Image (cartoon, rainbow, N blue to C red):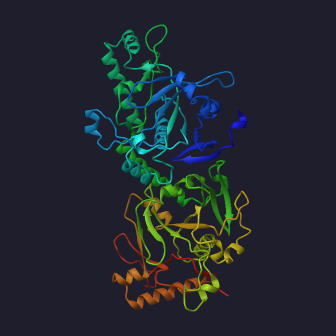
């Protein structure tokens, strides 16, 4: 058996870590931490082999395709599984009550279902919510036609837009594998008889009591099931009569069926607010001494490149790489590309790919496609840009910190993302200077951090105040905001004389730090507007400037 199982890759999808196995026929198996001890049982050949599956399955009640299956013996023992075909993209056959109350209901994607379930389990008060454990997601290689799956392309497109960086193929099946829970549904006759022995008046009263209890327990954890039913609560009749009790003496129960599990609106709003506040505080403290930093998980690594500290790791959903500024591994997930890459964005430049967006965590960011390696001969008539070339993302971040240390106000560097797919510009067409100068900078696996066949994106904090002030006053006041020199001129906040003075001031600040810019422009610095919409000025009365472009900086002399 060991010879048949390849080495897995580690993937984290929607916050859930998986061991990802690619099978010889092109199928995929994603195994959770709960499933890892039972890998042999979960291997498709041990439960989905056609003849075995046909004779070993038991169809379970419900509108979905779900079975109880006994696996083939592994190390002498079989295991009972619940295997359920995911219905993402299909119409939801809800009863009138649910349809009226939750008209927005859509089936979860498999990764969404496991993610929400894991989160609910972690948030539930001890002893309240038990569930069957999510073990694995199996994606057969065979592709089906949409008419065979019953999926709506528009529904799938909505899910793909929401989770664009997580694989979801309309033509493939997704099978969720759960551990089997011993017991019967609260509506089962065996449960009713045991409930009467436990003091309940009748079967209907017991089923309703379990329904209301499960709703209350889930609500306390911040979750709800949009088609919640009494039969979703599994109880266990005691062999001596009555029902197996929980620690408080009530009938113990476990929940099943999470294809319509969702956060409550209140928890959704609160969790986003709390997650943002946590982010702001961690961002403020991102360079705290390593001995005080949280322990680095196995998939992340500390790195120091050109004098800047990073947390480095893989972007499993896109096969890219990510460097997050600082020493705090807890900041890494905030900058995974699925958190900000496909959120609504506003273009900030007519000549470059620069965008302002709010991430899925409510964090305002600016991301820029780095021009490193792009041909520069036509960038300006003097040829100065061509002689220097564009800085790498790592050089840009190093300059930002060097200037800040020298007293030059700058925007905040947050993360560098190396895309997983290859660049459309062939390596031979690129300016080779930066790849040569960076050849000694390596990732933990020995590959160069800067590669001519890849594109890079720099992620910056959207300027709305210092990290210290924003973390402290997030809920107390409005924020500052930045406008570049040309915007300020167009809006009538400054005149041409003040714009020229601001350009000269920026150049003098750079020169004082031993840095020059090849072609400084009025779009390379920001002016700051207070929460009251007033232009901030320094003590000498001149407008306060803050550098926001680092692509063409160089050291003087």
In this view, the residue in front, 60 or 240, is: 60
Find residue 326 and report its horizontal and vertical position in percent: 60, 61
As drawn, 520 above or below 140? below
Q: Residue at image x 51%, y 86%?
A: 505
Q: Residue at image x 39%, y 57%?
A: 475
Left/right of residue 512 with respect to residue 174 in the rendered view = right
As drawn, 467 above or below 332? below
- Picture quadrant where residue 226 is located: top left
As drawn, 539 above or below 411? below
Find residue 56 and report its horizontal and vertical position in percent: 54, 22
Q: Is residue 493 visible?
A: no
In this view, the residue in front, 300 or 161, is: 161
- Picture quadrant where residue 249 is located: top left
- Picture quadrant where residue 18 is located: top right
- Quadrant of the frame with the C terminus: bottom right
Q: Residue at image x 54%, y 21%?
A: 55
Find residue 355 and report its horizontal and vertical position in percent: 45, 69
Find residue 369 and report its horizontal and vertical position in percent: 53, 70
Total numbered labels placed on residues in the image: 0
- Quadrant of the frame with the N terminus: top right
Q: Is residue 486 visible?
A: yes
Single out the residue that lies furthest toward the top.
240
As drawn, 175 above or below 280? above
């Amino acid at each position: 058996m060991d010879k048949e199982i390849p080495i897995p890759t580690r993937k984290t999808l929607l916050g859930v870590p998986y061991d990802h196995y690619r099978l010889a026929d092109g199928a995929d198996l994603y195994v959770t931490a709960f499933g890892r001890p039972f890998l042999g049982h979960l291997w498709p050949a041990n439960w989905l082999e056609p003849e075995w599956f046909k004779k070993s399955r038991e169809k379970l009640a419900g509108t979905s395709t779900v079975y109880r299956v006994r696996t083939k013996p592994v190390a002498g023992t079989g295991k009972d599984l619940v295997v359920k075909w995911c219905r993402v993209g299909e119409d939801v056959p809800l009863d009138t009550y649910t349809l009226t109350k939750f008209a927005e209901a859509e089936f979860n994607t498999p990764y969404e279902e496991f993610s929400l379930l894991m989160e609910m389990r972690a948030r539930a008060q001890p002893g309240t919510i038990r569930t069957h454990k999510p073990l694995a997601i199996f994606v057969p290689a065979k592709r089906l036609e949409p008419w065979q799956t019953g999926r709506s392309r528009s529904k799938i497109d909505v899910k793909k837009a929401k989770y664009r960086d997580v694989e979801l193929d309309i033509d493939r099946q997704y099978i969720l594998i759960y551990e089997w829970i011993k017991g019967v549904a609260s509506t089962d006759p065996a449960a009713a008889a045991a409930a009467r022995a436990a003091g309940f008046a009748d079967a209907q009263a017991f089923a309703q009591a379990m329904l209301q209890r499960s709703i209350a327990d889930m609500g306390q954890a911040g979750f709800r099931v949009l088609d919640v039913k009494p039969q979703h609560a599994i109880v266990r009749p005691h062999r001596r009569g009555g029902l197996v009790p929980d620690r408080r003496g009530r009938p113990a129960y476990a929940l099943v069926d999470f294809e319509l599990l969702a956060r409550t609106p209140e928890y959704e709003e609160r969790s986003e607010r709390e997650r943002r506040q946590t982010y702001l505080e961690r961002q403020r403290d991102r360079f705290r001494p390593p001995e005080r930093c949280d322990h680095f998980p196995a998939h992340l690594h500390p790195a120091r490149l050109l004098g800047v500290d990073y947390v480095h790791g893989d972007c499993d959903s896109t096969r890219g790489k990510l460097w997050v500024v600082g020493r705090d591994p807890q900041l890494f997930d905030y900058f995974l590309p699925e958190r900000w890459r496909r959120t609504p964005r506003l273009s900030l430049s007519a000549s470059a790919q620069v965008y302002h967006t709010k991430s899925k965590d409510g964090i305002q960011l600016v991301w820029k496609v780095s021009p490193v390696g792009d041909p520069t001969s036509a960038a300006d008539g003097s040829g100065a840009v061509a002689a220097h070339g564009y800085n790498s993302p790592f050089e840009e971040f190093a300059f930002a910190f060097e200037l800040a240390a020298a007293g030059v106000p700058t925007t905040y560097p947050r993360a560098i993302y190396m895309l997983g797919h290859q660049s459309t510009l062939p390596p031979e067409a690129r300016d080779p200077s930066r790849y040569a100068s960076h050849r000694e900078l390596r990732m933990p696996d020995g590959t160069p951090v800067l590669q001519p066949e890849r594109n890079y994106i720099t992620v910056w904090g959207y300027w709305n105040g210092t990290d210290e002030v924003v973390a402290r006053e997030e809920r107390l006041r409005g924020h500052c905001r930045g406008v570049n020199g040309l915007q300020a001129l167009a809006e009538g906040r400054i005149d041409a004389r003040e714009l020229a003075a601001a350009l000269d001031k920026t150049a003098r600040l750079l020169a004082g730090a031993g840095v020059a810019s090849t072609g400084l422009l009025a779009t390379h610095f920001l002016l700051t507007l207070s929460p009251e919409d007033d232009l901030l000025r320094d003590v000498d009365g001149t407008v306060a400037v803050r550098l926001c472009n680092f692509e063409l900086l160089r050291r003087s002399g």
